[in-house]
Structure formats: C-alpha cells, structure tokens
Image (cartoon, rainbow, N blue to C red):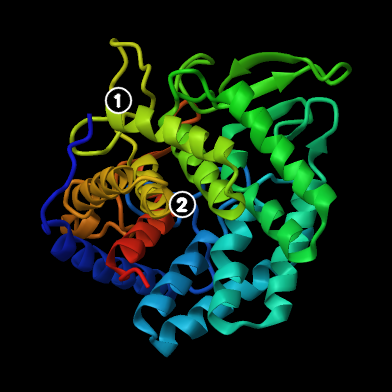
Amino acid sequence: MVEICTSDEWRPAAEHALEFAQGQVRNLIEHDPGFYPMYSEGGRWRHGKEAWTHWCDGFLPGMMWIFAKHTKDPYWFAAAERYSRPLEERKFDRDVHDLGFIFFSTYHRWHELSGDAELDAVVIQAGQTLAKRFQQKGEYLSSFMGPESVFIDIMANVGIIVYAAQKTGDEALLDVAFKHCLTSQKRLVRGDGSTAHEGIFDLETGEFLRQTTQQGCRGDSCWSRGLAWAIYGFTSVYEATKDPRFFEAARACANYYIVNTPADGVPLMDYDFPPDVEQRRESSAAAITAAALFRLARVVPHPAQGALYDGVARRIITTLATPPYLASETPGWEGILKEGIYHLDKGLGVGESVMWGEYFFCEALDRALTPIA
Ligand code: GLY
C-alpha cells in the first residue's frame, strides 16, 4: 500500500528534480540537436535498437512546453516550437493510436500558452484522424496491432477525440469517444480495478473474445503501465465530460494502484509477476500515475478523497525525485529518471530512461509546484 505523504518533504525534492530535468533536456538538445529519442540504452539516448512503434515524438517537446510554462524562459519557448513544428504532419497519421500523446503534449500546450487558433486546428485534426480507428461492431478504437485489437493505452489518447468533438460540436465524434471509453471500461477494467493490456474482438460479429497482453507478463495479469494509462485516461475524460461512469473507472483503477503498490509508490512492472521471475520496478508507470492523481485530486466530489490522491501523488514524486530513480548521481546518464521499462520481452529499454516517463514526471512536478488558481 502506498504511504501517503503528509509533510512538506516533497517540495525541495520536486524543485531540485525539475531543475535537474531542465539541465538534462538542455544537454540533450545542445549535444544532439534535432534528435527525438525514445528510450536509453545504458543511460545513453543514441543507440541502434528498434522503436517497435512510433509514438513518442511529442514527449521531448512536451517537456520543453512544461519548462516554458513553468519558467517563462524564452529559451524553452524557442526550443519547444522548433521541436513541435516537425510533428504537424502527423495529425494525419493513421498508423498509430497515439495521436493524443503526440499532440496534447505539443500543439495543445502551445495553443494554451499562445491562444493561436491555427495550433488548435492541428489538435482538432489529430482528434478527427484518431477517430478513424473506430470499429463499429465492437465499439472501440483499434490499436496499431490490427483492427481486432484494443489497448488500454488508447484511454490516454481518446481525450483528444473528446476535445475535437467539444471544440467542433460534432456529436458523432463525441459518440465514438464515449463508446471507446465504455468498451474499455467493460472489457479491460476488471472488477477489482486492475486492467488488462489488450482485448481481442471477433471482427465479423463484434464479440469480445479475450484479454491478452503485449507488454505485461500474461493476458490475465495487470501490467502497471497499462493501469497507469487507465488512471490517466479515465481521469482526463471525466475532467472533460463529467460523466460519473468515467470517474468510477478512474477511482477503481487508482484504488487498485494505491492498495497494491509498495509504500514508496513505485510499482513492479507487472502486479502478477510469477515469484520465480526477477521483480523489476517500473518508474514510468509511477510518473504517469502521479500526474493522473494530481488531476483526479482536483476533480473528485469529496475533499477527503482529493487529499488521499494528492498525498499519494506527492509520495510518488518524492520517491522518483531521489536516487536510485533520479539519475542525478549517476555520472554520464543522459536521462532524468532511471528504472523505466519499455518492453521486457523484446529487451527494449529495460531499467532505462524512457521518454514518456520523463514527460509525465515533469508534468507531475509542474502540477505539484503550480499553485491552484
Ligand atoms: N505502447 C505504449 C507503452 O509502452 O506504454
């Protein structure tokens, strides 16, 4: 069970970590300009290992937008714009289910800081493109694996369809987003609040066939990053729609995380690892969850529940802002957070820095350190 942080110990740790994060990103973009890394190998961003899927390019500029908002430093505005612009064409990308990751981190943040309607139009187009993955028969957005597959990860992206629908008043688009969320809740969130990574449907009939996984340890296990995507995703659609069904899903998943994660707030890569397998922690799942819980804490109906989520999120960032997770005491390590895992079975980014972990950690730090208006 995660121990709630009740003191102010988190603040100096978070301030130091956000400074450190800016230094690491600055080093990266000055020593390797124009490079968008995905995960490190031995702590180095440049290596020749495969990407598996192309979903991470928004996270590096996304961190720059967080730094720009937080510091108001023109250096970060210029760098963020330079690294965001080349992503615009991906608003038409039909190959990935990750357009929320790519555009909420970049063009949406950019639009929020500038108010420029052309930037908003890019985000709206990305939402419309993502909606084209909708499978009418099973009522879900299909994953990049194929039309029969849905991932829990897509919950962290579907918010961009809700956004596009609300901005344009397109009820059919909103319906696609709602149906995907409800299918994910029904098929991928279990009664105890744990989540399956992937669901498989019969394309002829739309019948749900089974839960399975690409990155967890088995089909009936709970992969911790999938759970984190669920907490983040259901929280963001609840924030946008105020539909209590999405709050219920976010609450159930958050509760599973809080009850089943070690006291320091960082989960194992999978909650159901068999005992004979090396038990590895997964820092990026913790970073995503911290960012999600700060959001959830601000929209819960009951203040006591908000204090719980806030206290757990502060525990997580305090742990992550300290070695062995923070890389501040590892000379030559180029990332911010150690001990992330991209894909254990494929041997990609195991015990490494991963770009989404870096991004959501910075988002969580920014949320913790920004006074509520
Ligand atoms: N495929 C998204 C993730 O690794 O979380």
Q: Secondary structure at mark 1?
A: helix
Give the side of residue 16 with respect to residue 49, left or right.
left
- Measured as percent of width and height from the top left, residue 204 is found at 89, 18
Farthest-out residue, front? 302
Q: Quadrant of residue 154?
A: top right
The residue wearing badge 2 is 356
The residue located at (35%, 81%) in the rendering is 71
Up the image or down, 180 lies above or below 166; here it is: above
The C terminus sits in image quarter: bottom left
Farthest-out residue, right? 204
Give the side of residue 12 with respect to residue 124, left or right.
left
Instruction: Tell me if mark 1 has few (under 14), some (14-19) or many (20+) residues whose alpha carbon lies within 10 angstroms of its own.
Output: some
The N terminus sits in image quarter: top left
How many marks overall? 2
Comparing 283 with 187, the one in front is: 187
Q: Quadrant of residue 364?
A: bottom left
Disc 2 vs disc 1: which is toward the camera? Answer: 1
The residue wearing badge 1 is 260
The three-letter code of the residue at mark 1 reads Asn
The residue located at (53%, 52%) in the rendering is 239
- Measured as percent of width and height from the top left, residue 107 is found at 62, 70
Farthest-out residue, bottom? 74
Q: Is residue 291 visible?
A: yes
Q: CA distance from mark 2 to mark 1?
A: 23 Å
Instruction: Tell me if mark 2 has few (under 14), some (14-19) or many (20+) residues whose alpha carbon lies within 10 angstroms of its own.
Output: many
Q: Secondary structure at mark 2?
A: helix
* Circles 2 and 1: CB atoms closer than 8 Å: no
The three-letter code of the residue at mark 2 reads Trp
The residue located at (68%, 76%) in the rendering is 119
Task: Kindly tell me whether mark 2's CB lies below 8 Å from ligand 1.
Answer: yes
- Measured as percent of width and height from the top left, residue 144 is found at 70, 37
Up the image or down, 159 lies above or below 120; here it is: above
